[in-house]
Amino acid sequence: MSVQEYLVQILITYGVIIMKTNIGTFDRTIRLTIGISLLAGAWYFNSWLLAAAGVFSLFEALFSWCAWYQLLGKNTCPINSKK
């Protein structure tokens, strides 16, 4: 069981609404890179705004979910597209 599957099981157990994945592997990689870069910039410039954007980007990459994609109905995850 992967870490992501384990976290999903914990969230389901406690009744938290699960977000459907809508980000593919390429998008996740880009968001992870951007998140790490933003966090590095936040540390260098001592900026809480860059830190918040970096954490949000990392959240999206780790959970394969994007709020904007959900609002726009966009999905780049190949697993969900086949259904």
Image (tube, rainbow, N blue to C red):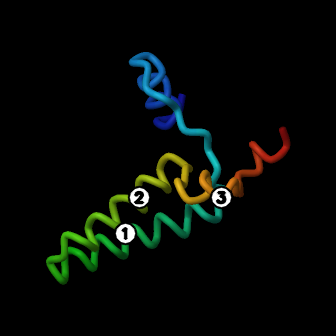
Callout in the foreground (2, 3): 3
Choose the circle earlier in sequence order: 1 or 3: 1
User: With 23 as the anchor, is 11 left or right in this view?
Assistant: left
- Residue at the left extreme of this rendering: 46
Circle 2 packing at 10 Å, graded few (<14), some (14-19), many (20+), is: many
**Mark 2, residue position:** 58
**Mark 1, residue position:** 36
Query: Mark 2 is on which residue type?
Result: Leu
Distance CA(mark 1)–CA(mark 3): 26 Å
Query: Mark 3 is on which residue type?
Result: Leu
Residue at the (50%, 56%) spot, across then down:
61
Circle 3 packing at 10 Å, graded few (<14), some (14-19), many (20+), is: few
Choose the circle earlier in sequence order: 2 or 3: 2
- Residue at the right extreme of this rendering: 82
Choose the circle earlier in sequence order: 2 or 1: 1
Which quarter of the figure is the N terminus placed in? top right
Displayed quadrant of residue 24: bottom right
Q: Percent x, y for residue 4?
A: 49, 37
Q: Percent x, y for residue 66?
A: 54, 55
Q: Is residue 28 above or below residue 81?
A: below
Which quarter of the figure is the C terminus placed in? top right
User: With 26 as the anchor, is 58 left or right in this view?
Assistant: left
